[in-house]
Image (cartoon, grey):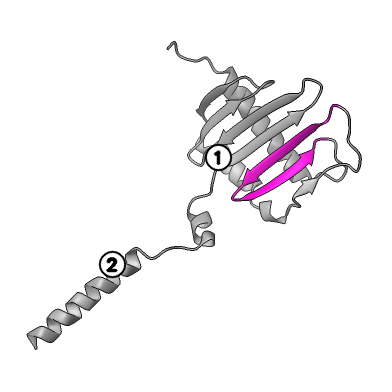
Amino acid sequence: MTKSLLLCSLVLVTLIGCAKNAPVNDRQVRSIQPGPILYHRTGGIAGTDDRVVIWPDGFVEVHGKVLPDGEGWVSKESMEQFWNQLRNWDSLDHEYLPGKPVNDAYTIAITFNGKTVTASDLAPGLPSAFRVLFGNIEKTAAEISAEPKPAP
C-alpha cells in the first residue's frame, strides 16, 4: 500500500508541475499582457522619420527628425486611454492609402500585437479611430520630448 501511495504522490506532483509550465496560446498572452505600441511617421515637407515606442508599463521612447528624442513615463490613466483606443484594432484594414501619392502627406504605420496598419494622414476614408490614436501618440511623444532632462 505504501508503494501505491508513493507512486500516486509522484504522479500527482509530476502532473501539477507539467500543468504549471504548460504553454499558453497567443490569445491568452494578449489578454494577460498587451505588447508595445510602435509608431512610425515618414514624409511631409520636412521628410520626417519619427518613431515612438509606448511600452505596456507606460515607458515611452521617442526618436525622430521632427519629434525630438526623449523618453519618459505616462500615467496609468493615459495607458488605459491607449488600450481603449486599441480595443477594436483587429477590425481595421491593413492599409489606408490614397490611390495616387499625395505630395507632403505623412505616412503613418502603427503596430500593435503583431498587426501593422499603414495610412496616409490625407487618405480618404481614414477611420476616426486611427486618426484619434495617432494624434494621441503624437501628443504624448511631444510632451515626453519637451520634458527637461536631468544633467548626465
Q: Residues in magenta?
A: 104-121
Q: Are marks 1 and 2 in contact (CB under 8 Å)?
A: no
| 133 is within the stretch colored magenta | no
Q: Nearer the viewer, residue 98 or 139?
A: 98
- Residue under numbered circle 2: 17
Judge whether residue 111 is colored magenta: yes
> Quick one: quadrant of the N terminus?
bottom left
Q: Residue at x 54, y 46 (%)?
A: 35
Pinpoint residue 112: horizontal percent, then vertical percent: 61, 46
In this view of the protein, which residue sits in the foreground, 117 or 126? 117
Position of 19 compared to 111: left or right? Answer: left
Tell me how far mark 1 sits from mark 2, CA to CA.
35 Å
Residue type marked 1: Met
Q: Is residue 2 above or below residue 115?
A: below
Taking 85 as reference, is 150 above or below it? Answer: above
Q: Quadrant of residue 66?
A: top right
The residue identified by callout 1 is 79
Q: Dot 2: within a 10 Å radius of its alpha carbon, few (fewer than 14), some, or many (20 or more) residues?
A: few
Is residue 88 something one can see in this rendering? no
